[in-house]
Amino acid sequence: MIRGFKIGVTKWARQNTDIHTIWQRNYYERIIRSERALDAIRRYIVNNPLRWHLDRYNPDTVERDPWSVDIWRMMQE
């Protein structure tokens, strides 16, 4: 079902916009092992749109996002 949805969205976007890359390649699943990590991830999700200027996938990024590095380091603990 997900595959069909993604195919449909990709076809529509390529026919109706100038966007050709629709989906992010790969993703990483993590097991959240502590309440502290869960709270940090929730804050990251809520605040992520405000931090686009620091995102490594933003072609106009101004600097590396230290907050995201800390969150992923915490997830490794």
Image (tube, rainbow, N blue to C red):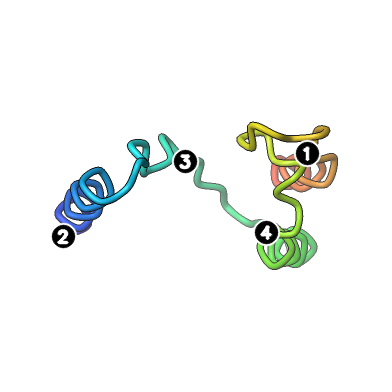
Point 20% across, 46% down: residue = 15
Name the residue carrying label 1.
69
Name the residue carrying label 4.
49
Count the labels in the image.
4
Q: What is the three-letter code of the residue carrying label 4?
A: Pro
Neighbour tally class for label 2: few under 14, some 14-19, many 20 plus, Cα within 10 Å: few
Label 2: element kind? loop
Q: Earlier in the sequence, mark 4 or mark 2?
A: 2
Q: Is residue 67 left or right of residue 50?
A: right
Label 1: element kind? helix
Name the residue carrying label 2.
1
Q: Is residue 62 left or right of residue 75?
A: right
Neighbour tally class for label 3: few under 14, some 14-19, many 20 plus, Cα within 10 Å: few
Q: What is the three-letter code of the residue carrying label 3?
A: Tyr
Q: Is residue 47 left or right of residue 29?
A: right
- Provide residue 16's location: percent of width, then percent of height: 25, 51
- Provide residue 72's location: percent of width, then percent of height: 72, 42
